[in-house]
Amino acid sequence: MQNFDKKDMAILRRMQADSSVAVADLAEEIGLSVNACWRRVRRLQDEVVTKQVAILAPETFGYGLTAFVSVRTNEHNEDWLAQFSLGISQISEVVEFYRLSGQYDYLLKILAKDIADFDRVYKRVIKIAPLSDVTSSFAMERIKSTTALPL
């Protein structure tokens, strides 16, 4: 971890909650001049902020189903991984994709409009590369969801 002081951490916490906050408001909140705050924000954006985005409510766009798909494969070589990674990366409904240790090899988080829409996406996933087991679980309720790191 880089060496950040209390003001840097306060800026980062606030930016994680709302990156559109005006520098003048941020400066007032953490007790800095606007210029000093602006310089810190620019430095932190250059050093640790990887992306600033708007997080949309999936339900607003009809995505009412969240599925977690666990995948096992008997293939563990670079060519297979390249094929699978490229194929999965091209499916926009797959919003998160992880390679795992343990019982399953990969975990996908898929947003779909309904079961029929999920089935359409599922059929695309299983065509990409040979898989030995695919198990899907559906979220009943989102209890916590955050993009903020615990600073």
Image (cartoon, rainbow, N blue to C red):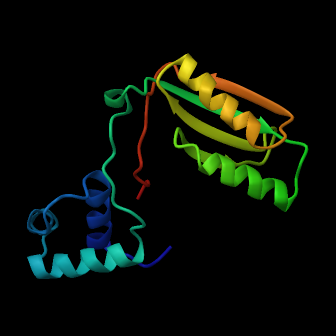
Q: Position of 134 compared to 24: left or right?
A: right
Count of numbered circles on the image: 0
Residue 35 point in image, percent of width and height: 12, 81
Residue 45 falls in image quadrant: bottom left
Q: Residue at x 28, y 51 (%)?
A: 17
Q: Residue at x 31, y 29 (%)?
A: 60
Residue 8 point in image, percent of width and height: 30, 72
Residue 101 point in image, percent of width and height: 78, 48
Q: Residue at x 68, y 25 (%)?
A: 136
Q: Is residue 33 at least partly visible in the picture?
A: no
Q: Is residue 143 at least partly visible in the picture?
A: yes
Q: Is residue 14 above or below residue 143?
A: below
Residue 81 falls in image quadrant: bottom right
**Residue toward you, 91 or 110:** 91
**Residue toward you, 30 or 95:** 95
**Residue toward you, 124 or 30:** 124
Q: Position of 55 compared to 82: left or right?
A: left
